[in-house]
Image (spheres, rainbow, N blue to C red):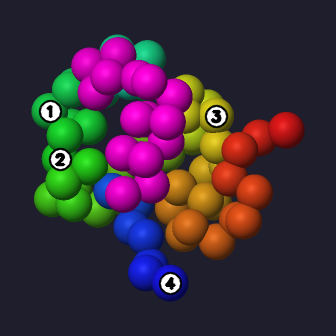
Amino acid sequence: MTRSTLASRIKERRKTLGITQTSLAESVGMRQQSIQYLESGRATRTSFILELAKVLQCEPDWLLKGENPEQQKA
């Protein structure tokens, strides 16, 4: 099993939910370019993890570490 990254988890959830980078950025209070940097792996940390998790409907721990097998909130 390949190990996923913060970048791949953000992109995967965003695409699964049908959200654009621009829409995600606006919902979280970031710039679209910041989302692009996160998804490309050029940025590896963010102070917006709680906001991202809320909009992406997943657990912050899953976004950060990929450890929570049940990524979606109940």
Identify the image quadrant of residue 3: bottom left
Residue on which disc 1 sits: 33
Q: In the image as oriented, which residue stretches furthest toward the bottom?
A: 1
Secondary structure state at the residue bearing disc 3: loop
Q: Nearer the viewer, mark 3 or mark 1?
A: 3
Decide which of 21, 30 is in the foreground and name it: 21
Task: Give the left or right position of residue 23, taking residue 49 as reference.
Answer: left
Residue 37 visible: yes
- Find the distance from the CA under tag 4 to the CA under tag 1: 30 Å
In the rendered structure, which amino acid carries the disc numbered 2? Tyr
The residue labelled by disc 3 is: 57
**Secondary structure of the residue carrying numbered label 1:** helix
What amino acid type is highlighted by mark number 4? Answer: Met
Q: Residues within 10 Å of mark 1 (few under 14, many from 20)?
A: few
Mark positioned earlier in the residue sequence (4 or 1): 4
- Picture residue at 64% right of the left edge, 34% below the top: 57
Nearer the observer, 9 or 50? 9
Q: Which residue is mark 4?
A: 1
Q: Quadrant of the rendered structure where residue 26 is?
A: top left
The main secondary structure of the magenta stretch is: helix
> Cα distance, mark 3 to mark 4?
24 Å
CA separation, marks 2 and 1?
6 Å
The residue that disc 2 covers is: 37
> Looking at the image, is mark 3 or mark 1 earlier in the sequence?
1
Q: Position of residue 7 (x, y in %)?
A: 33, 56
Marks 2,1: beta carbons within 8 A: yes
The total number of labels drawn is 4
